[in-house]
Amino acid sequence: MRSAILGFVGGAAFLQTQSALTAHALHILLALLMLAGLLAWLARGRWRIAAGVACGAALGFYWAAVLASHALAPQLAKADEGRDIVVTGTIDNLPNRTGQFTRFFLAVERAEGVKVPPRIALSWYAGFRGEVRDVPELRPGERWRLTVRLQRPHGNANPHGFDYELWLLEQGIRATGYVRPAGRHERLSDFVPSARNAIERLRHGLREKIRHALEGREYAPVIVALVVGDQRGIDQDDWQLFTRTGIGHLVSISGLHITMIAGLVAWAMAALWRRSFFLPRAQLPLLLPAQKVGALAGMLAALLYVLLAGFGVPAQRTLYMLCVVALAVWTDRIACVSHVLALAAGLVVFRDPWAVMWPGFWLSFGAVGVILYASVGRTAVWKNPGDPDSLDPDERRATPLTRLQRLMHVLRGAAHTQYAVTLGLVPLTMLLFAQVSVISPVANAIAIPVVSLLVTPLALAGGLLPEPLATPLLVLAHELMRWLAVALQWLGAAPLAVWHAPVPSWWLFAFALAGTLWLLAPRGWPTRWLGAFTWLPLLAAQPDAPAPGTARIVAFDVGQGMAVLVETAGHRLLYDTGPTYGTDANAGSRVLVPYLRARGIARLDGLVVSHGDADHAGGALAVLRDIRAGWTLSSLPLAHPVVLAAPGHRHCVAGQRWEWDGVRFEMLHPTAASYADPSIKTNGRSCTLRIAAGGKVVLLAGDIEARQEAELVARAAPALRADVLLVPHHGSGTSSTEVFLDAVRPALAVFQVGHRNRYRHPKREVVERYERRAVDTLRTDIGGAIGIDLASPIRVDSYRVSRPRYWHD
């Protein structure tokens, strides 16, 4: 059974690596393979385990393909993108209001004149292109008629980045869009009865109750996350603190919290049942054993809590494991822990085959697996811990312990569990996040008791109890969380609190994982300490780099904006930092920092912010906060926040030159005199950088326009000749003039543009200018991030081409 389930999980995971869903012929082949494997498994031969894995893998692959085909079927026609559409539907999730807009999911019941997918994601803006309108308070279960504009699912595609399109597919979202400011908007019903709407309305009520009770308090979003699982309100700085100290798993409805609540409810119900609720004539234990009643009560409590949590993967895993244990209690069977874990994993993937694509799945099951591997069958209870041989084996288990001995036994068990989890998850954490929290054991030793035993029960009680009991409990939970955050900030300030290294290759991960299993092996295993040495290649790895004299360029897919990383053999330069996405997000935190950390790049030798427009400088502060920079060049005013935060800032000026590892850099624009000319717009002062490496030249032109292009042709025409051109101003109609393109004569042009951007970049007439000159063109909105190796010949890689997936549009 376990081998078949593990094969099922592996088969579902393998489907998620496919560029297209399989044809019917392969489905038939998989069905035959599954049938052959099933027959071999039933035969109980020597190949039974292999047959079980093969059968499970075929079934998992086929099941995931069926669900994927069903999820992809609803589509918005391309002709209907960007049109005004009147839809009627119900809000079926917790709306998230941040700043000037509200995001929510709408279960579509009817659309006028067009075919719309059954579930869509919408944003309702209060300020839209200069207009200021009030956004009404939205609640789950309400039925609305709205005028919207939709598009097919699309997200930025970057190495080591978040796959927004996959997340939308998992959520059942097949179109995204926004509510039109001018249109018919009408609330048709306050509540549409359904089980889902009832649960979401309950979650909404609890969230609003907590927000009201803790209004203006810093860690109110953390209390909300612990009660209803809504983490969207937690500040980015707080998330950084929790990640740096390794307690991020506690700031949510985790398996630990669910198990604790289920255990408390099971213990209380079993105790009351055993005493017949203090009714002497009831004699309830004679009707049904208290142990079974407790198991059922704990399972129901876990189910209710998981529903409040929004049914995340860690919550699902814990619920399924508790259900299996409760079923074993009710059927008087002994539940093997490995069977319980495997069955829980199978149920999670059966319900949601895309769960295997998220770190939470592997961390959740990996942590439990490590605990079981390091503890099951290895613990014993002793009368005298200092003299285990003083009692025979039967006496060791029969002699009762004193309270102090029981306490010491619990503490030793907790310390051993924390030790096993901390060490056991090092390879997996490096693989998923390219970092490991060194202070995590200390931070968790403090945070687990505080959050699990104090903050979470108080927050739940405050959320469920009526006033005037609720507010004092919620305030107390918040203050405990605030005091804990102070301690975590002190721990997180240590210079080596987090160890960073590049994401390891599969063989390096496997080598470290084997060593970790050796390290956590049972006592008596020879030289267990040698397992720690397998981490050295993992933790000491350095980022890969191009050969001396060559350079690697990565033009990121940041939407409507610009961000380019330039790497030489020993140096790294970031040119622009992408746009701001909202009050709480930007390309720096969403795209650039995750990429740099996954590559193991902790320092930039230089940062160039070409000019102050939000689509170029929007992510700069996030990059400067998380990544050290040697110096900064920009055309920004000296009072700009980026200038104030940047180390070694200087204005970019034509004539600046430097050389790194045989690669030559030269600034071509703006001139020093241009800073005194108030008539020049910010675009006109874009830092224009020429890079020569491997006999090839790249020109990064920022947002210069026709006037600046003419000046460059007149002043530095020979220096403009380049093999690769980052198209000026995203291909706007005011740039890429004929005379400029004749001077540059690029072989390859890269357009950094946003998908269906409102400026309609690149303009058709601009693209035609490049096509007439037989210039190869690449677009980030189509190909994702674009990598270019400046060597002879130039090598080009588009992320969506090299890593195609069936859910990409």
Image (cartoon, rainbow, N blue to C red):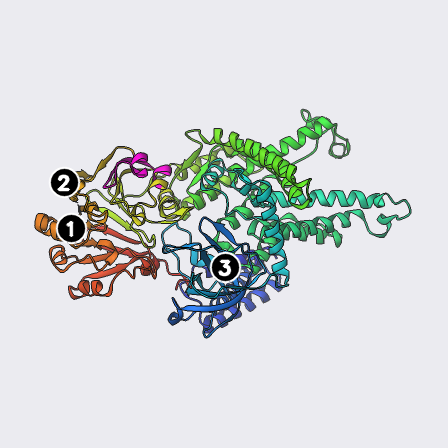
Is 330 on the left-hand or right-hand side of 509? right
| Image vertical order of residue 546 relative to residue 799, above or below | above
Q: Which residue is mark 3?
A: 170
User: Mark 3 Cα within 10 Å, few/some/many (few <14, many 20+)?
Assistant: some
Which is more N-terminal, label 3 or label 2? 3
Going by the picture, which residue comes out furthest to the bottom?
113
Q: CA distance from mark 1 to mark 3?
A: 47 Å
On the image, the x and y values in percent for residue 620 come to: 33, 42
- Identify the secondary structure beneath mark 1: helix
Q: Is residue 549 magenta?
A: no
| SS under mark 2 | helix
Q: Which residues are magenta?
A: 623-646
Residue 634 included in the magenta stretch of the image:
yes
Look at mark 2 in the image and give the residue it sits on: 673
Spatial separation of the CA atoms under disc 2 and disc 3 = 54 Å
Give the CA separation, mark 2 to mark 1: 13 Å
Q: Secondary structure at mark 3?
A: helix
Q: Position of residue 170 (x, y in %)?
A: 50, 59
- Which circle's residue, 1 or 3, is located before the other in the chain? 3
Q: Quadrant of the C terminus?
A: bottom left
| Amino acid tagged 3 | Glu
Residue 724 figure quarter: bottom left
Q: Which residue in the structure is indicated by mark 1?
A: 708
| Residue 9 visible in rendering | yes
